[in-house]
Image (spheres, grey):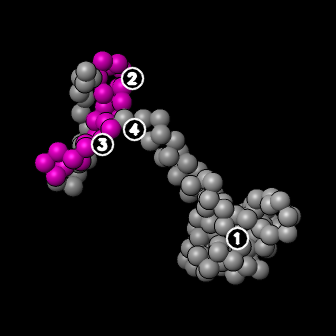
Amino acid sequence: MEQIVLGIGDVAKATGVSQSQIRYWERKGYIESQVVEDGKNRKFSYKTLLKVQQIKMYMDDGYTLVAAVKQAKQRGTFLDGLRSFFEERFVHIELVDDDIQINLGVFDPEPTKDLVAERIAGKWHFKLIAHEK
């Protein structure tokens, strides 16, 4: 996902934010474009597209641009934390009798067991299970 690059027109079309607004936000340092070989066209990462979309969402909800940028940055930090958590902890997911089980790996206080999150009837529960061999 981080290797996807989009032109300013693509970002504008996908988010509903005008190209001039995107350029302004870039000049203010709220978003960043990537350097392109020809030095003329702006290219944006998919992550930046999501940030533009979030800023617009907050502005549509009545936030000022500065407050919307702050909220989008905080949300981005939260999402990065969640992504990092799952990249480091996720071991396995399976469906058992229409219920989902997510193995989160070794439970630190009891290293012979894994922590498993289990959704049963729409509610999450946690349990420890012995390592599978």
Q: Residue furthest left?
A: 97
Q: Label 3, on which residue?
A: 93
Q: How many discs mark residues in the rendered view?
A: 4
Identify the residue under disc 4: 90
Give the residue type that dot 2 points to.
Answer: Asp
Look at the picture and state if 12 lies above or below 39.
below
* In front: label 2 or label 4: 4
Left of 123 or right of it: where is 40?
right
Q: Which residue is mark 1?
A: 7
- Disc on the earlier residue, 2 or 3: 3
Q: Amino acid at mark 3?
A: Ile
At label 3, counting other C-alpha atoms closer than 10 Å, the crowd grade (few under 14, some 14-19, many 20 or more) is some
Task: Read off the residue under disc 2.
Answer: 108
Verify whether residue 104 appears in magenta.
yes
* Contact (Cβ within 8 Å) of mark 2 with mark 4: no
Q: Position of residue 95 (x, y in %)?
A: 21, 47
Q: Residues within 10 Å of mark 4 (few under 14, many from 20)?
A: some
| Vertical comparison of 61 with 34: above or below | below
Indicate the secondary structure of the residue bearing disc 3.
strand
Going from N to C along the chain, the mark reached first, 2 or 1, is 1
Q: Earlier in the sequence, mark 2 or mark 4?
A: 4
The amino acid at mark 4 is Phe
The amino acid beneath tag 1 is: Gly
Residue at horizontal 17%, vertical 45%?
96
The quarter of the image holding the C terminus is: top left
Residue 67 visible within the image = no
